[in-house]
Amino acid sequence: MSVYKVDGIGTRKDGAGGESSNFSEGNVKVVRLVGFAADSGGDVTYTKGDVVALQRAAATVGGSDVIGQFGIANVELAAATTELLCVGVCTETVTVKDGTTDIIAVQVAGTFVNANVATASTAGLQIFPSGTAGRGALNASSDADTNKPYAIALENASSNQADIILLNPLDY
């Protein structure tokens, strides 16, 4: 069997007797999930690079219960103090108006450039949800439900941004 595709992170032979870096983005996976802004709760902005989590919470959107409309497949900006499972990073900035829903593109696997990650994060270490909504950090939460990494830092974070590789926690 021949190799169909070289993918992932590492090095490979370059055909000239040397090796070249392989940072393929062929393993990027993006899913579309429902984001919402609860009635009378104000607009919610999902910013490119922010981490999001699956949420199961009672909220009224457009006069209807959001769980009844979408089950648990709705997302909210992730914070370790409130969210159960980080699933990925927003690929674009979307503002959901008060009392409405919108589709949010969420990258769940592959490399992501300039994700929202706390400045103290260091290359090679796992990234967990933090106490700041939408931001990842090195330290795992004390809550066993949120104590799950969703990415690995590929560089030291600067100005709350770092390149990361997402671990596809739900195996989409």
Image (tube, rainbow, N blue to C red):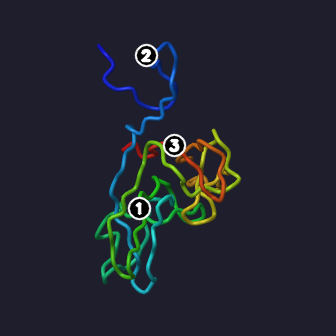
- Which residue has dot 1 on it? 92
Tell me which amino acid carries mark 1: Glu
Q: Are marks 2 and 3 in contact (CB under 8 Å)?
A: no
> Horizontally, is 118 left or right of 91 in the view?
right
Of label 1 and label 2, which has the lower sequence position?
Answer: 2
How far separated are the C-alphas under marks 2 and 3? Answer: 27 Å
| 34, 59: nearer the viewer | 34
How far separated are the C-alphas under marks 1 and 3? Answer: 17 Å
| Residue shown at 48% from the left, 43% from the top | 111
Which one is in front in this view, the residue at disc 1 or the one at disc 2?
2
- Which residue has dot 2 on it? 15
Considering the numbered disc 1 on the image, is that residue within a helix, a strand or a loop? loop
The residue positioned farthest toward the right in the image shown = 120
Of label 2 and label 3, which has the lower sequence position?
Answer: 2
Tell me which amino acid carries mark 3: Ile
- Which residue has dot 3 on it? 165
Tell me which amino acid carries mark 2: Gly
Residue 129: give its label.
none
Query: In x, y percent, where is residue 45?
Result: 46, 72
